[in-house]
Structure formats: C-alpha cells, structure tokens
Amino acid sequence: MKTQKNTNGRQQSATRRMKTWALAIAASAVIATVGLMGWDFDSPSGQPTAQRNQAARLDMAPRAESPEGVVQFAQLATGRETSEAIQARLTRRYQNPLVMRFLRTLTVTSGTQLYAEASRMIDTRHLEPSTYDARTRRAVRNLMHAAENPAFREAAGISPTDQQVRTYQSTMARLLNEFKAQSSADATNAMRWSVEVASRHLGLGAGPVVTEFLYGATESLDKYSTFVPPERDNRPQASLKDHVVGIGVSIKPEDRGVVIEKVIPGGSAETASLQKGDVITAVDGKSLAGKSLDFIVDLITGPEGSQMKLDVTRDGAGSGSVRLTRRYVAISSIVDVKMLDSTNKVGYMKLEQFTQSSSADMDKALWKLYRQGMKSLVLDLRGNPGGLLTSAIDLSNKFLPCGTIVSTRGRTAADNTKESATRQKTWKLPLVVLVDGNSASASEILAAAIQENDRGTVVGRRSYGKGTVQTQFPMRSTSASIRLTTARFYSPDDRQMAGAGVTPDVLVEQSDAEGADADLMKAVDVATQQGTADLAVAKGSCRDHSHGSSSSNGFRLQS
C-alpha cells in the first residue's frame, strides 16, 4: 500500500466504537481511533511517500534505593499521566501480536540503527520535535512501569521477583535524575545503558527495551504520532483501502470473544449466514475469552484461500461451528444510502471513513439517489473519524464549483499547500452536512469547505477539532514505519481547525432518547428550506458558465 497522509483522528475516550475492525481483516483494519486513529497518509503534493523515498528528540538528585524511593521516582517519570493510563497502554501494546513478533527480531545493533533512523525522521519532519531528553524520559518511564505489567512480562518472556523489579526501577530512576540527553548520541547511549540494566536485573533481551525507546520517542511528540510495527508477512496496512482479504465482518470486543457489528456484503461470513449480534467465541479451537482484539484479529487474518473454523453463539439459537474461507472483500466507505423523505425527495448517505474508494463510492450513491428523483441531499458525517486528506479534497470537489477547500502548513515546502475546487462538473443540489463531536479531521475539512464557501448548511453538534495532518514514513532499516504529525490544516476562511472544529449552522442538542433521530429530523427540515436551496443556486453562479451548460435536470452544473 502506498504511504499516505493521515487526517484521521478521534480521541480514544470519546469513541465507543474504538477497536471496531473492518475484519475482512487485515490486522490493522481499525475503523476508529487508537493506534490508530485511522490513517490517511497522502502528502499534500499528491505523491506517495514511498515514491518520494522519504528519509520518510542535569541537575543531580539523591539516589533512591528503597521501595518508597522507587514510587517517588516513578511518579516523577510519569508527569501528568496516571500510572493506570500507562499500564493500560502497555497492555494494549504487548497484547498486539505485531508488536510481539517485531520485538523478537531486534538486537542491540539493529535497534541502535533503527532508533537513530527514527530520531532523524522526528528531527527533520515532525511539526514540533520534542527534545532528546523528553524522548528518553518517556521511554525510561515506560520501562519502569513495564516491569510490573503482566502483558509486557509475558511478551518478553520474563518472571522477575518483586525485589528484582524494585532494584531495576531504582537503577532506572537514577537515569532520570542524573542524566539529561542533549543529542541523538546521548539518547542512544541511554538506550544501550537501559538494555544492559534490563538484562542484568530482569533477564530482559534488547528487543523490548528498544521497542519502548521507539514508542517513547513518538509518544513524547503528540497523541497522533506513533511507531508502527510491520504487518505480518510485511503486508500493507488495510485501513483506508477499498478491499481486504478475510471473512467480511466488523467486530467489537465481548466477554466471550468478539461480537459481530456488521456483516460486509460479498464476504464468506455473509455466505455462511452470520449476522449482527453473533458472538465468535473460538478460532480453530482456540478460545477467545479474555483475549485482546489485536490478538483475535491476528488469529482470523490469513492468506486468501485459507480456511478457518469459527465457534459462534447466537442468542436464542444456541452455539455451533462454521468453516469459512478467507477471500477478497470489497469495502465501501458509504454504509447507508436511502431516500429520507419520499415526498420532498431528500436523499441521504452516510460516509463512515474517507478511504481510497470514497470518491467512487460517493459517485455510485449519488447516481443511485438521482435516479430515484433526489432533489436535496443529507450527507451524514457523524462519528466519521476522518481518513485520507486527498479523499476529503475529492469529495469537496463534487459540490464546490469554486473556492478554497483547505490549506496545510508545516515545516517543509511539500507540507505547505492550498487546495481549491477544480472540477468542471459539480452537483448543485441543496446540501446539508451532519456532524457531531466524533466527526474529525477529513470530516471537518469537508464540512468546513461546504460551510465557509456558503455551499450548504451544517447541522448537528460541534465537531472534534483535530486539525493536524500525519504522514507515515517507511523506514529503511526495517519494514516498520513511523507516523508523524507534519502539518496543521486550516479552513477556507484561514481558521486553524485544531481545537476549534466546525460549529454547526443549526445546533441540535444531543439526546439519549431512543427512537427518532433528532439530527436527521432537523436535517430533513433544513434540506427542504428555501435558504438551503438558495445557497446551492448562489454558489453555482461563482464561475463563468460561457464554456458549459447546466444539465436539464438541474442537479449537475458544468462550467
């Protein structure tokens, strides 16, 4: 998969669908946050990173030897983040089979080379690089907590005693208090020293220590930058692609294993009549109870044509087993298309993510609604975490005959861009865009482009306000990659989006009441108002039409 820029993001605490996977399944096919927070990686210049070949951060203190001293230094290392949050992140990390496989490949020599390469990338491409001292402290803090983390211990194959852990933590605390890394060489020396200490006190190999120095470096930057371990068999990542190889379901965690959230048309799960609500409890005889989603996804992942046996429980129907064949499954980013109001012909489509196929998916949906007599459109971006920057631009172009779409600003010329509407043919029907607090990045680019160009009306609640672009750089010394924040993006009115988001023209208070969708009810009302139609007509006249003509149906404008 070509490397592309990422505007996909949503804060972890805000997403109840976090860790829902397009499980047709490649191991990283996350539909919403974490890691991932999805990942669109096209550069503003439109050139894939892989093709661009990118080369793609002391005052003395008393030593503490007592357990009380260890706690004190652990708190010093933690800063504002709680120990519980650090432990939760470490558990997720070391229950991920991709990380587990990666750390076993590392040696001191290869790890040193990899860390130096990551450091250079951060120094040259991150929007605001952290200091080497901050990167080192983050890594050491992680390792001090990791010594007590069950998932880390299991992945690393160690079983230290409590005394060994305390001694290790005390020794590492000295590094935090007696040493300040001021250069890449200093940070590398700190990593090598940490490898020696971990080996001596915990019997720990180099791999886990190097891994935490890599993650520590990126975690010291911002919440979107991260180290990305290689996929199994070095496959490209499947998130944001238009297809995957698997069984064709989206899943989320459940006590007994995972529950199916959606069956994707064309997959072997559909052929086997699996349905939403079914609980997968075992894969090839291996129980899924208590296993992480990363672990389960890895079990289900495999080459096209290979088979697996799933144990499935269905409420009211008991349990059974089904044998499925992994196969190619097309993934559409448009998950719902319908006519909301058959009288006024209000069309509706829900865009789940901005992916490689989104432009074609939207064209298909628009023409389907057009053939049903659509007179206005509601585009639902609620819960959409974002995706490809290029996709957001393409979709904006379908409705904007002129005007700025988005601009980006970073440290390099390639990161400083201004994208404007360029298509000669655009849809000129009245348009309403639905957003909420989980609409982020690419969703906000599209919503702001429609709103600030006076092309349509935004309805709902203020969007998330991500406002930054990530670029994923392949590494030369390994098949892993590093994702870095490389730019901020700005709305057509030159408004910085980070922390601000998009404020709806029509605010709808969030309701927990079951039944009617208040957002959709208001969207239909707004879509049929004369003011929304006037916006479409007014914007349609922003170009000289002497070189083209309007289609007789009034839905597409050629200029």
Image (cartoon, rainbow, N blue to C red):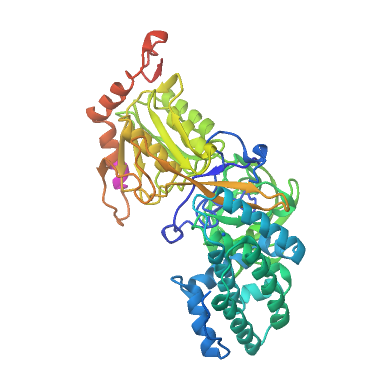
Is 499 drawn above or below residue 534 in the view shown?
A: below
Residue 518 magenta = yes
Q: Horizontal placement of 403 versus 235: left or right?
A: left
Q: Is residue 22 visible?
A: no
Instruction: Give the main secondary structure of the magenta stretch.
Output: helix
Question: Residue 3: x and y, percent?
Answer: 62, 42
Q: Residue 363: in sight, yes or no?
A: yes
Toward the viewer: 35 or 287? Answer: 35
Q: Residue furthest front?
A: 59
Q: Residue furthest top?
A: 546
Q: Between residues 263 and 233, which one lies in front from this camera angle?
A: 233
Residue 438's place in the image compared with 453, above or below, is: below
Q: Work out whether residue 252 or residue 116 is closer to the camera in this orientation and state it.
A: 116
Q: Please state, as top left, top right, bottom left or bottom right, where the N terminus lies in the image.
A: top right
Name the spot of residue 545 as percent of width and height, x first: 37, 12
Q: Residue furthest left?
A: 530
Q: Check residue 416 for magenta coloring.
A: no
Residue at x-position 49% and y-position 58%: 223
Q: Is residue 22 above or below residue 219?
A: above
Relative image position of residue 448 (x, y in whole percent): 36, 38
Magenta stretch: give its range.
517-521
Q: Residue at x 29, y 36 (%)?
A: 524
The percent position of residue 290, horizontal first and vertical second, equals 59, 70
Q: How many marks?
A: 0
Quadrant of the image containing the C terminus? top left
Q: Nearer the viewer, residue 474 or 234?
A: 474
Q: Quadrant of residue 67?
A: bottom right
